[in-house]
Image: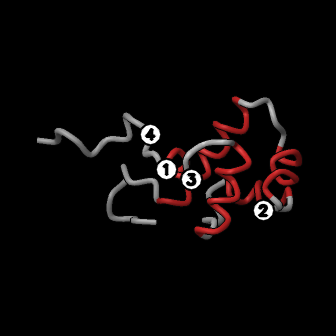
Amino acid sequence: MNTDNPFDPGVSVIVGANVREVRKALGWNQMTLGQKAGLRQSSISAIERGERCPSLERLLDLARAFGVAPARLLMVPTGTGGEGAG
């Protein structure tokens, strides 16, 4: 995580927020996602909290389970700051 920029939440936090958002939109709990992606519920929980950043292979597993492009899980949320400063 980049601690120099308070508006940069870091890749693990972004991925975690996106995983949580897509999972909830599908109405799945962490256990269901874990079963579909081949991951333990504790791993899903750590990813969603931004404590663990999934490897590329795991990111692909999550995207396949969701039926979305991997890029969807890497999208930076709008309104995080950093643009137009000055």
Residue 24 percent location from the top left of the image: 73, 33
Estimate the spatial distance between the alpha carbons at disc 1 and disc 2, rounded to whole Å: 20 Å
Categorize mark 2 by other alpha carbons within 10 Å: few (<14), some (14-19), many (20+).
some
What element does badge 4 sit on?
A: loop
Which residue has dot 4 on it?
Answer: 77
Assess whether mark 2 and mark 3 are in contact (beta carbons under 8 angstroms). no
Q: In this rendering, which labeled residue sits more in front, label 3 or label 1?
A: 1
Q: In percent of the image, x 72 and y 39: which residue is there? A: 23
What element does badge 1 sit on?
A: helix
Sooner in the amino-acid sequence: mark 3 or mark 1: 3
Categorize mark 4 by other alpha carbons within 10 Å: few (<14), some (14-19), many (20+).
few
Q: Amino acid at mark 4?
A: Pro
Q: Amino acid at mark 1?
A: Ala
What element does badge 2 sit on?
A: helix
Residue 63 percent location from the top left of the image: 64, 50
Q: Is residue 70 left or right of residue 86?
A: right
Which residue has dot 1 on it?
Answer: 71
Which residue has dot 3 on it?
Answer: 15
Q: In percent of the image, x 60 and y 42: which residue is there? A: 68
Estimate the spatial distance between the alpha carbons at disc 2 and disc 4, rounded to whole Å: 22 Å
Assess whether mark 4 and mark 3 are in contact (beta carbons under 8 angstroms). no
Q: Amino acid at mark 3?
A: Val
Residue that protrudes farthest toward the left in the picture: 86
Residue 65 percent location from the top left of the image: 74, 48
Q: Amino acid at mark 2?
A: Ser
Assess whether mark 4 and mark 2 are in contact (beta carbons under 8 angstroms). no
Assess whether mark 1 and mark 3 are in contact (beta carbons under 8 angstroms). no
Which residue has dot 2 on it?
Answer: 43
